[in-house]
Amino acid sequence: MYNRMLEKEALRLSELFRVVTITGPRQSGKTTLCKKAFPHHNYVNLEDETTVGELELNRKEFLVKHRKGLVIDEVQKMPEILSAVQVVVDEYPDAAFVLTGSNNLLLMQRITQSLAGRTAVLTLLPLSIAELTEEDKSAGLYSIMLNGFYPAVWAKHVPPQDIYRQYFSTYLQRDVRQVMNIRHLSEFRRFIVICASRIGTEFNAQGISNELGVSIPTIQEWMNVLETSYVAFRLPPFFRNIGKRLVKTPKIYFHDVGLVCYLLGIHTSQQLETHPLRGSIFENMVVCEFLKNQYNKGLDNNLYFFRDKSQHEVDLVLEDGLQLDAYEIKLSSNIHPDFYKNLNYFRSLFPNETVTTQVINTGQAENDSNENGHRFYLNVP
């Protein structure tokens, strides 16, 4: 069983809020986390028809009976239960509930209506590199990127293409149709594959629209579906008072690079090592590591990229109040002075705000001799 960094934050917030809500992709480990963090809570899963039937008879009575500790899994399956949770929490000072869900839009809409101010909301993404390598210390870089970070791939030692084939099929047939009625699933499937082939690049709705032959509003709507269901996300551009010189289109990344490899037809580490998108896949993985780090601490997403119209680009910018950290991401074991050009340019634009400039690569940190920044070494062979 993998130790999840979010567990500490979930336990801390459970002391402050009567309800803790954990969202995240399907199969990211929410159920396992809840059972480990709250071993004395009762547990129900709203995928279970028997449980749903019992709740439909009298939701409040059921919740009152289990109010001193109850995990309700896949709560988006019965969103109306949130109103009953609100009533029980308001009436009983000893009530304590943990809710999980894998559909962010449907879940958050209901929480805003029913549990605003009563619940802490956390996001659990798939395993981080630190969580994974704590248990699987021999995992190599290309193996990690190929397998991705879903716990089932590593815990069950199932070939990743088999896991992701089933995951993707289930996603299309069930999760997508919960969000909206997409009539042409074959076109939507092609859309996802196109997005996977464009990770680390600006999200060009017009270009994808032309390629698929569907309208731009439809492409934007489909992208919203990918974000809502934790498949992909858009990284916004950073800008602060330098206006028109900046590119304002977001970049696209996936929450898991194992799924990207599956969608691109990459089935072995050897294929990945020579694939033309291996650098983009590595960049996607690193960006997700920073995002997981934020979420695992219970913090908001504060990630951006920087690019101006002169094509000066920094892969990742972290904004913490007025302070900025800037990162270049390179799938390389060597350092080249050119890697620092854009970082130095960024620092020249924001000299007072920029705290850190780093190149993230796969080399040994002690080899770095550049005085303008330092590298962050990914702890994988």
Image (tube, rainbow, N blue to C red):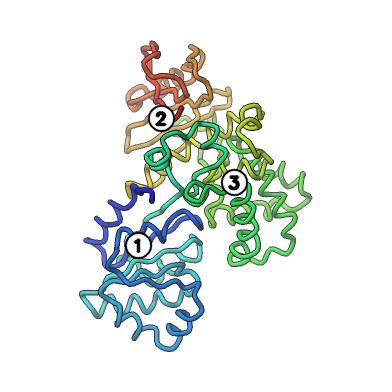
The relative height of residue 29 versus residue 249 in the rendered view (above or below) is: below
Residue 63 location, quadrant: bottom left
The x, y position of residue 236, in whole percent, is: 51, 40
Q: Residue at x 26, y 57 (%)?
A: 11
Q: Residue at x 76, y 48 (%)?
A: 212
The relative height of residue 42 versus residue 211 in the rendered view (above or below) is: below
| Residue annotated with mark 1 | 35
Is residue 85 found left or right of 248 in the rendered image? left
The relative height of residue 8 versus residue 198 in the rendered view (above or below) is: below
Q: Nearer the viewer, mark 3 or mark 1?
A: 3
Is residue 13 found left or right of 182 in the rendered image? left
Q: Residue at x 24, y 55 (%)?
A: 12
The relative height of residue 153 versus residue 337 in the rendered view (above or below) is: below
Q: Amino acid at mark 3?
A: Pro
- Element on which disc 3 rests: loop
Query: In terms of sequence position, does the residue under pointer 1 or pointer 2 come before the other?
Result: 1
Identify the mark at residue 379; answer none if there is no mark: 2
Q: Amino acid at mark 1?
A: Lys
Q: CA distance from mark 3 to mark 1?
A: 26 Å
Q: Can residue 146 be seen at all in this image of the molecule?
A: yes
Is residue 255 found left or right of 222 in the rendered image? left
Identify the mark at residue 159; answer none if there is no mark: 3
The x, y position of residue 49, in whole percent, is: 51, 79
Q: Can residue 299 be seen at all in this image of the molecule?
A: no
Identify the mark at residue 102; answer none if there is no mark: none
The x, y position of residue 52, in whole percent, is: 47, 80
| Badge 1: residue crowd in 10 Å (few <14, some 14–19, many ≥20) | some
The x, y position of residue 320, in whole percent, is: 33, 37
Residue 90 or residue 178, whichever sits in front: 178
- Element on which disc 1 rests: helix
| Badge 3: residue crowd in 10 Å (few <14, some 14–19, many ≥20) | some
Q: CA distance from mark 3 to mark 2?
A: 23 Å
